[in-house]
Amino acid sequence: MEKKVIGRKEKVSIPEFDLYLVWAKVDTGAYTSSIHAENIQVKEEDGKKVLTFQVLMPGHKSYTGKEIKVDRFREKSVKNSFGQAETRYLIQVTFQLAGEEYPAEFTLSDRSKMRNPILLGRKILKDKFLVDVSDYNLAKVYRQKTERK
């Protein structure tokens, strides 16, 4: 598979969360990817553990307030940007970037102090993308090609 060139920031979509073309920081220094989530809770429904949360922050133009429920999740220890280990919930979703869909793992984290609510780490990028750090939104070229089909 030919690698696609993307920039340091890209617009990604996660249709199952009703998120479309939300800015994401591309971070080759981070191993895992993360998405901003609030009101994270583990509940029991019909005898099963369910993780509930809301993505993005109120005030973000793509914020829906929709409660998302997933029954496939796990906890993972992750080093944050300050090098401190913290436990986060890890979920699997399909995201869209550069006109393609990819299955991926995202941790749920508080990114409220960050410029971008989504971070794409190198685990997602490996073998699929080359990153041109001198520019951003390069994936729009690939999106436009698939939209014209």
Image (tube, helix red, strand yellow):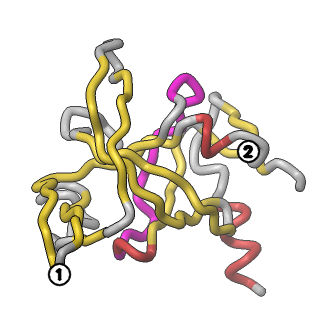
The residue carrying pointer 2 sits among few (fewer than 14), some (14 to 19) or many (20 or more) residues within 10 Å by Cα, namely some
Q: Single out the residue that lies furthest toward the top.
A: 83
Task: Name the residue located 51 percent from the left edge and 42 percent from the top edge.
Answer: 120
Q: Nearer the viewer, residue 70 or 31?
A: 70
Mark in front: 1 vs 2: 1
For image coordinates 37% across by 69% down, the residue present is: 19
- Magenta-colored stretch includes residue 137: no
Compare marks 1 and 2 and give the one earlier in the sequence: 1
Residue at (16%, 58%) from the top-left corner? Answer: 42
Which amino acid type corresponds to the residue marked 2 in the rendered image?
Phe
Residue occupying image coordinates x 38% and y 64%: 72
For residue 129, the mark is 2
User: Residue 82 appears at what percent x and percent y?
Assistant: 31, 14
Return the residue found at the far right. 1
| Residue lying furthest bottom | 149
Please state the extent of the stretch shown in magenta in the rendering: 18-30
Residue 75, position as x, y percentages in the image: 33, 43
Between 99 and 83, the residue placed more toward the observer is 83
Which of the image's four quarters has the N terminus?
A: bottom right
**Which image quadrant: the C terminus?**
bottom right
Residue 46 is marked as 1
Using the rendered view, name the quadrant where residue 148 is placed: bottom right
